Amino acid sequence: MKVSRTQYEPGNGTRYDLSWYYDDEGYLVVTWWGQGGSGGSTIRVNREPTESYVREKMVLPRAWTHNDLAVVTGWIRSHFQYPALASGGNP
């Protein structure tokens, strides 16, 4: 399994530290690292995510704003095909 990591900078003055991989069942797993990369929250994506789905499954702290949630959800949507299983795992 190969884990990839990026510092996503969407132009809003914020960096988003994200890592991702596909698990053995072909599902996308994304971690949104917070606190300077020392801790974060992970989601196993089994359908195209909405903001409410990502917030619920990642159990995000209230300090992470709606704008942050929208950016990360948009990044997940734009970088991966859904469902991962239909595309044979890694697109």
Image (cartoon, rainbow, N blue to C red):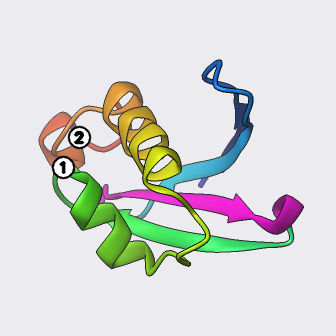
Instruction: Answer above or below: position of 61 versus 24.
Output: below
Q: Which amino acid, mark 1?
A: Leu
Q: Is residue 87 rendered to the left or right of residue 55?
A: left
Q: Residue at x 31, y 58 (%)?
A: 27
Instruction: Give the residue displayed 65% in from the left and 48% down from the top.
Output: 18
For the residue pair 25 and 59, the one nearer the viewer reads as 59
Q: Residue at x 57, y 63 (%)?
A: 64
Q: Is residue 37 left or right of residue 11?
A: right
User: In the rendered structure, does residue 30 fall within the stretch colored magenta?
Assistant: yes
Residues rendered magenta in the picture: 24-37
Marks 2 and 1 close (CB-CB < 8 Å): yes
User: Residue 51's spot in the image, x, y percent?
Assistant: 28, 54
Q: Position of residue 70 (x, y in %)?
A: 39, 43
Residue drawn 37% across and 35% down?
74
29 on left or right of 52? right
Mark 1 Cα shell of 10 Å, populated few (<14), some (14-19), many (≥20): some
- Which quadrant is home to the N terminus? bottom right
Type of residue at label 2? Gly
**Label for residue 85?**
1
- In the rendering, at what x and y percent does residue 20 appear? 56, 50
Q: Which residue is mark 2?
A: 88
Residue 55's place in the image compared with 75, above or below, is: below
Seen in the image, is 91 located left or right of residue 62?
Answer: left
- In the image, residue 60 lies in the stretch drawn in magenta: no
